[in-house]
Image (cartoon, grey):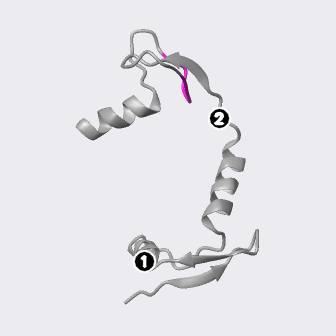
């Protein structure tokens, strides 16, 4: 029913593919308009609106490696580096 479609980004002017899967997702959510920005420009706009994230230093309770996390660690609650967090998520 859906076919990949090439669109032009309104910000950078580069062409990008609006995949059949993305079109199906948009339709399932009731979105009627096609995206006007490529993935990179959408991410840049989203980050610009949100502002820079403050990162906090922490030590992973699993491997002991120092890492940066986007939240202020609370004493008594475990903090995992991204690798250990991903592994923990896979195992659950």
* 72, 40: nearer the viewer: 40
Span highlighted in magenta in the image: 67-73
* 49, 84: nearer the viewer: 84
**C-alpha distance separating marks 2 and 1:** 32 Å
Crowding at dot 2, Cα within 10 Å, few <14 / some 14-19 / many 20+, comes out as few
Residue for badge 1: 27
* 83, 22: nearer the viewer: 83
Describe the element under mark 1 as helix, strand or loop.
helix
3, above or below 13, in the image: below
Q: Which mark is residue 53?
A: 2
42, above or below 64, in the image: below
Q: Is residue 74 left or right of residue 50?
A: left
Residue 10: image location, x then y, percent: 74, 74
Residue in view at x 42 percent, y 77 percent: 27
**Magenta segment: does it hold 68?**
yes
- Please, which residue is most extreme toward the bottom here? 1
Describe the element under mark 2 as helix, strand or loop.
loop
Q: Is residue 13 visible?
A: yes
Residue in view at x 38 percent, y 29 percent: 84
């Amino acid at each position: 029913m859906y076919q990949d479609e090439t669109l032009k980004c309104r910000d950078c002017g580069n062409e990008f593919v609006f995949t059949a899967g993305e079109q199906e997702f948009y339709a399932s959510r009731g979105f009627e308009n096609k995206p006007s920005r490529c993935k990179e420009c959408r991410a840049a706009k989203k980050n610009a609106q949100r502002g820079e994230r403050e990162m906090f230093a922490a030590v992973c309770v699993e491997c002991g490696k120092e890492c940066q996390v986007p939240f202020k660690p609370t004493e008594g609650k475990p903090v995992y580096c991204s690798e250990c967090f991903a592994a923990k998520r896979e195992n659950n």
